Image (cartoon, grey):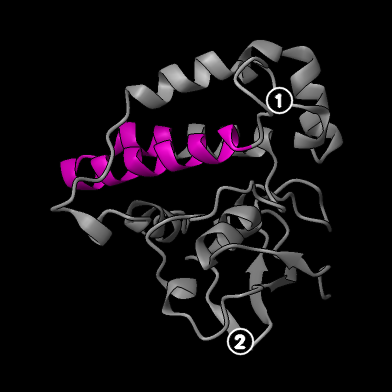
Amino acid sequence: MTGELAEAHSLVEANLFVVVTPCPACGRGPLSAAGPPAAPTSITPANLTLEARCAKCSSTKTFVFALPGRTGSRAIVRPTAINSEDSPSRIIDVAQWLTLAKMIGDAAAAETDRIQARHLLIDVGQCLNEALKFYDDEDNDLPPPGALFHDASRRRFRDHPEEFSRRRLLDARSRLPVATESEGAAAGCWGIARWFTEMTP
């Protein structure tokens, strides 16, 4: 079953989309939880194709992503940032970025390797940065309606608007580490990449 064409900024963003997408067959399992990060089955001049399997019902799903302006780039496969552009994601909404920040933050709290825990916390900061890209201006403490792509996200916003406060996100972001110049690309998305592999049951 082939998914709809969606625009991704990087392979990491595409994999994170899979993590927060419920299985279309059973509606329960995260599709990437059954194995390591979905490896690209192909990268063409226009598209990236990923295969994923549901952790609950074992059904498979094929996702096809457009990669405009990124043809043949090594950054597609090993990016140092989830999204190096100022524009927000077209495939992961603000509520899903908050979910990812929580999931990766929980992994960091359970991590015994201090370097890996730091890399994961740097990636939590990247997720919060992606969420903040949806906010219209500094005078608006809440995201606009267009920042919520799904019914579940809209219900979460309606029931818990305080979770979406810009001030809250900025405060959380200020308490997280950022990659130093000496760490360079070594910290960029490496925590997420290892987290993907450790999701294997």
Q: Is residue 90 above or below residue 169?
A: below
Residue located at (49% from left, 65% from top): 37
Of residues 51 and 135, the one nearer the viewer is 135
Q: Which residues are magenta?
A: 105-133
Q: Name above or below for residue 23 compared with residue 1.
A: above
Determine the residue positioned at 75% across, 35% down. Answer: 147
Q: Quadrant of residue 145?
A: top right
Magenta span: helix, strand or loop, mainly? helix
Q: Nearer the viewer, residue 90 or 20?
A: 90
User: What SS does tag 2 mark?
Assistant: strand
Q: Is residue 55 visible?
A: no
Residue under label 1: 143
Report the residue that reaches farthest toward the left.
Answer: 182
In this figure, which residue is indicated by the disc labeled 2? Answer: 42
Residue 30 in sight in this render? yes
Q: Earlier in the sequence, mark 2 or mark 1?
A: 2
117 in the magenta segment:
yes
